[in-house]
Image (cartoon, grey):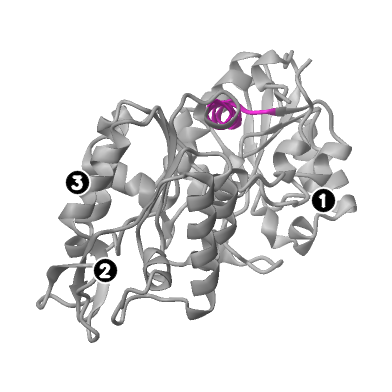
Amino acid sequence: MPKLVVDQLDLSGKRVFLRADFNVPLEGARVTDDTRITAVLPTLRCCLERGASLVLASHLGRPKGKPDPRYSLRPVAERLEARLGRPVALLADCVGPEVEERARALQAGEVVLLENLRYHAEEEANDGAFARSLAALADVYVNDAFAAAHRAHASIEAITRFLKPAAAGLLMARELAALARIFERPERPRWAVLGGAKVSDKLGLVEHLLARVDALVIGGGMAFTFLKSLGHGVGRSLLEPDRVEAARAVLEQARSRGIPLRLPVDVVVAPGIDAVSGLRTVGIREIPEDLMGLDIGRATVTQFATALKGARNIIWNGPMGVFEKERFAAGTLGVARAVADSGAFSVIGGGDTVAAVQQAGVMDKIGYVSTAGGAFLEFLEGRVLPGVAALDDAA
């Protein structure tokens, strides 16, 4: 069901509890990447322009249920204040009498940021009493944290039992619309491109997608378990021996469904991920026993690119090699350009995947870039996301 969206609400004079995802990377007290902060700005401005005041909430890191200054949201408040162009006061806590008093005193246009929700163990426990305390801070609930929507936490799921209406923010709405376009109103043929390290992390996803896509491309470390299931030697490449049979079953399922499943035909091998010499490209039948595959080769990139030319929709998650090492990034960058040049409506998600698109300079050719990681994958797997299910349906 389509969800109620914040721009459909009358917010004049209302206090909005806005759950954002400000789980940003820090170096000391400095935000090193504010992508997640800037992504929520349209929702903040929408609320403020409609006469609301804002009570912002987020988690940051894993403080294990107790205050830890390393995970304070103070750097976020400072960066957000600069981006938003108005004061953003960081409160000392997220619940309690002092916080409630500050929230009640808010005037239209004012913004406060609660301290890290995960300073309280009740947040991750989805505790009802804690959620009720959060709900007491506002008149309206808005969730713009799709990246955390797969978590049944107090500020994401339980709070909606006590605070209505519960609406999606503009970022959340865009995420859901893009994913709906891929899965509910797809243009055919629809392709999926999957990479990453382990088959075990994405086996359920592969099996789910086989019933929903017209073709599948698999690269990255996970490809070696599939190659092993076909009888290829993989040298010292990443391999999950206990998943070889499962990989073979997936290949058989794809064959029986008539779904093309493309694997690498060549790989870049080296003695290890830190090697600066001894790198070379070999066919998948020629991987030396003492070397490991760390990227897809040029022939594979060419074959993947040719295949993707026929796609109308593309879903991509996961790098094709050890992307964080420049010498093993060419395959992932090549696939990024292939997805961009395919002419398809593409949806990508995952940190390395987004970084590859940025590095390849093709961000403007991607249909939609998801800010989420785990939530993106769980949606692709067909799971119900608690943070989405908890929101009110659109009228």
The answer to whether residue 227 is left or right of residue 244 is: left
Amino acid beneath label 3: Thr
The residue at which mark 1 appears reads as 96
Q: CA distance from mark 1 to mark 2?
A: 51 Å
Amino acid beneath label 1: Gly
Q: Position of residue 114 (x, y in %)?
A: 67, 46
Q: Are marks 1 and 3 in contact (CB under 8 Å)?
A: no
Q: Are marks 2 and 3 in contact (CB under 8 Å)?
A: no
Magenta span covers which residues? 168-181
The answer to whether residue 69 is left or right of residue 292 is: right
Please tell me whether mark 1 sits on a helix, a strand or a loop: loop
Judging depth in this view, the residue of 227 and 377 nearest the camera is 227
* Residue at x 12%, y 70% (from the top left corner): 280
Amino acid beneath label 2: Leu
- Residue 358 visible in the picture: no
Question: Which disc, if any, is residue 294?
Answer: 2
> Chief secondary structure of the magenta span?
helix
On-image quarter of the N terminus: top right
Q: Vertically, is 111 above or below 128?
A: above
Query: Which circle, 2 or 3, is nearer the viewer?
Result: 3
Q: Which class describes the residues within 10 Å of circle 3: few (<14), some (14-19), or many (20+)? A: some
Query: Which circle, 1 or 3, is nearer the viewer?
Result: 3
Residue furthest bottom in the image: 290
Mark 2 or 3, nearer chain start: 2
The residue at which mark 3 appears reads as 302
Image quarter of residue 390: top right
